[in-house]
Image (tube, rainbow, N blue to C red):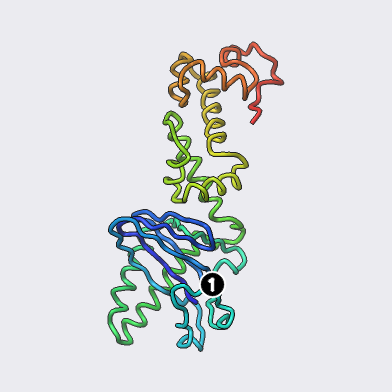
Amino acid sequence: MDYLFLYMEKGRYVLTVEGTDYELNEGGLALIQPGQLFTTRGFGDCVVPNAHLDFFYNPEREQSFVTTPGQTNLDPYRSLLQPQLNAFPGVRLPVILQPKLPHACKETLLQMIEHFKHNDIYHALTVQTLAANLLLLLLDDGGSAGSFDFEGQQFARKMNAFLSYSLSAPLSVEEMAKHAGYSESHFTTLFAQHFGTTPHQHLLHLRLQKAKELLTATTLKLAQIADYCGFANESHLSKSFKQRVGVTPRAFRTGTYSHSLAGDSD
């Protein structure tokens, strides 16, 4: 019926929201919106401060505490549901949040929980004010006009930065997914949606782009370039380069090839 905002202070959760798995690690923040079917699985000694929130006024709110664990059909109670934020134009908030000010979001939640313990008008109004502040913090990231796919934009930026920094590392899809905060299956699906290829193919593309840069701008030996760009050896670099670019690294460096073959065929 309402919003569930979670902060993973300790441990690890896997949230399954509408059939999709999301991994919430220490320090992570998540938002489950009204009407979404979800389950949680905790790993380790979990400490998860959380709050159920109504962001919108409903005069029948006192009647909305009708759901129980395992309940999946909310049709009889639709009038009591809070509207989803993602139903508003220009708003796209993901389940796993990556806010600009994560510390502010965390502190706002903890203050809300502390004030909620006191049953008086001052603390009740303070909780309402903090909830409004939290909503503004979330919308500042995911609610700007024209932000048609906030989760995708954040995901693409985060992965490009991580992969570019880790070109020389032997990365597995499992390690990429863990860094992104998703299950491996959901990560692979999301990656294909936003990059149009598999994680390993995109990583290979970035490695070859870096190899091109080093071949053009430095005098490094091919073995060194192979090492810097995450290839097993010089032979591996040469084979991959020829397959994807159309020429050997040596020919690319000296310019002794047809310019029609110079572009990456990716």
Can the viewer see residue 219 in this picture? no
Percent across and percent down for residue 86 are 57, 66
Determine whether, in the image, residue 5 is placed left or right of residue 37: left
Which amino acid type is marked by label 1? Gly
Q: Residue at x 62, y 58 (%)?
A: 146
Percent across and percent down for residue 163 are 47, 37
Determine whether, in the image, residue 241 is placed left or right of residue 21: right
| Vertical position of residue 197 compared to residue 118: above or below | above
Q: Residue at x 43, y 28 (%)?
A: 168
Determine whether, in the image, residue 65 is placed left or right of residue 76: left
Q: Residue at x 54, y 69 (%)?
A: 85
Binning the other alpha carbons within 10 Å of mark 1 as few (below 14), some (14 to 19) or many (20 upward) gives: some
Q: Nearer the viewer, residue 98 or 125?
A: 98
| Vertical position of residue 163 compared to residue 38: above or below | above
Q: Nearer the viewer, residue 68 or 193?
A: 68
Residue at the extreme right: 260
| Vertical position of residue 151 compared to residue 164: above or below | below
Can the viewer see residue 52 in this picture? yes
Residue at the extreme front: 70
Name the residue that disc number 1 marks: 35
Q: Quadrant of the C terminus?
A: top right
Res 209 quadrant in image: top right
